[in-house]
Image (tube, grey):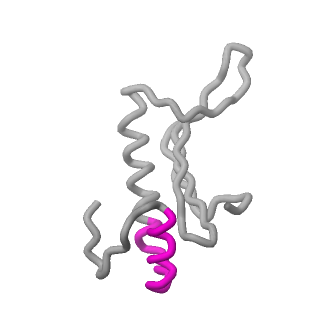
Amino acid sequence: MSNKPVHEVKLGLVKASVWENEKGHSISLNKSYKNESGEWKTTNYFTAFDAPAAARCLEAAIDYVMSAPRKAPQQQESQASNYGARAIEGDDVPL
């Protein structure tokens, strides 16, 4: 992964970051909070109260990834095999 995300979506204290590497994209999701000392920290744990913002950020990040240029089919096959999955031909891939 690169040192900086290629895209970020923030809603309140929740942020989704899209990263790009040689195999494609990945998404990280975290929340900022202040600890007892008043220092800003991040976590990947969310309360039920955070869930709507987390879902919206994640959905927007997925929309960004899905609209990004696609890799060549042989790269997609290679990427799928790295995760123990088969590549599915065509644009209609069930989620």
Tell me where residue 24 appears, x and y as whole percent: 54, 70
Tell me where residue 21 appears, x and y as whole percent: 63, 67
Left or right of 91 in this view: 3: right
- Vertical relation: 91 (above or below) 30: below
Q: Quadrant of residue 86?
A: bottom left
Tell me if residue 20 is in the magenta stretch: no
Q: Quadrant of the N terminus?
A: bottom right
How would you classify the magenta stretch by its main secondary structure?
A: helix
Left or right of 23 in this view: 74: left
- Residue sitting at 63 percent across and 33 percent down? 42
Left or right of 76 in this view: 33: right
- Vertical relation: 52 (above or below) 46: below
- Residue sitting at 61 percent across and 64 percent down? 6
Numbered circles on residues, count: 0
Left or right of 49 in this view: 40: right
In the image shown, does 21 or 6 lie closer to the viewer?
21
- Residue sitting at 50 percent across and 30 percent down? 45
Q: Quadrant of residue 66?
A: bottom left
- Residue sitting at 57 percent across and 61 percent down? 7
Query: For the magenta stretch, what is the residue range?
Result: 64-82
In the image shown, does 1 or 89 lie closer to the viewer?
89
- Vertical relation: 43 (above or below) 10: above
Q: Quadrant of residue 95?
A: bottom left
In the image shown, does 81 or 56 lie closer to the viewer?
81
Tell me if residue 71 is in the magenta stretch: yes
Tell me where residue 16 appears, x and y as whole percent: 52, 49
Residue at the far top: name it.
Answer: 36
